[in-house]
Structures are given as structure tokens and as C-alpha cells.
Image (cartoon, rainbow, N blue to C red):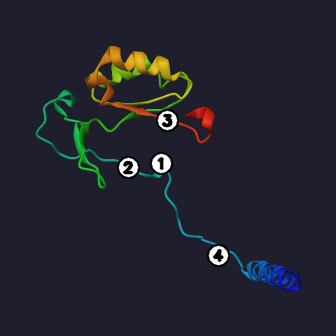
Amino acid sequence: MLSKTIRRNFSFNQYFDQVIQNKNRIPRIVDEVKFDFKDVLIRPQLTALKSRSQVNLLRNFKFRHHDTEWEGVPIMAANMDTVGTFEIAEEFSKEKMITCLMKHYSVEETVNWANKVGKDVLNNVAVAAGTSDRDF
């Protein structure tokens, strides 16, 4: 019992030492000029393209810890209630963009939809899940 009390007191002492050290630190005041969006001029790069429609937005991604590659446009629809829907996923997949499905779809709804749309759409879909058992 005594050893637990000593350990507890030791940890409290360490904690209070850290509090005192942090209190004695003075924050560094930065008075340098910082840029904001209104301060930055984006100048277009010279190009041989005749029209914006000639721009290729497709990018190829190799995953670091897996041998999978994904090619598409690196734009994602958020997993918000009215954005990450099945309909958005179908439309975004036509342009090879990713949709993060909202988590309020049931497993049955998602499986039925996945069977209906096929692999072309599913290659551009991400599923968001929470951390509780109810979310899985």
C-alpha cells in the first residue's frame, strides 16, 4: 500500500513540475509578414494546349503498402448525408472521381446497390465507418 502511495505522489510531483515548466515558457511572437489568399497571384503556366478541354486530370496512384494501383481524378465527394450518396457515386464514377459513401446506408442497401452497379462504379467508392459496434 505504501509503495502505491509513493508512486502516486511521484507521478503527481512530475505532473506539477511540468505545469510549472510550461507556465514559465513565454510564447514566441511572430511579427513576420504572412501571405493570405488575397496576397498571392497565381499566374498560369505557358502551355501548348488550345483549350481547357484538352487538360488531362487523370492521375495514377500506387499504394505504398499494397500492390494496388488506382487511376482517376483526385477529387472526392465527402461522406456527408446529402453528398455521399449512391446517385453521386454513379455520376462521379463516370469521370473517375471518388465518392465516400455516407454511413447511414444499411448493409443490405449497400450490398444491393453494389450488385446492381458493378465493378466500374465500385472502383471509385470509399466507405466510411465509425468506431462503435453499431457503425460496423
| Image position of 84 (left or right of 116) | right
> Which label number is shown at residue 128?
3
Q: Is residue 124 above or below residue 82?
A: below
The amino acid at mark 3 is: Ala
Residue at the far left in the pictured view? 48
Mark 3 and 2 residues: CB-CB less than 8 Å, in contact? no
Identify residue for label 1: 37
Q: Which x, y percent locates residue 98?
A: 36, 32
Q: CA distance from mark 3 to mark 4?
A: 40 Å
Q: Amino acid at mark 2?
A: Leu
The residue under the point 47% across, 48% down is 37
Residue at image mark 4: 28
Between circles 3 and 1, the one closer to the viewer is 3
Q: Residues within 10 Å of mark 4 (few under 14, many from 20)?
A: few
Identify residue type, mark 4: Arg
Cβ–Cβ under 8 Å for marks 1 and 2 = no
Q: How many marks?
A: 4
Identity, as a three-letter code, of the amino acid under mark 1: Phe
Residue 44's spot in the image, x, y percent?
26, 44
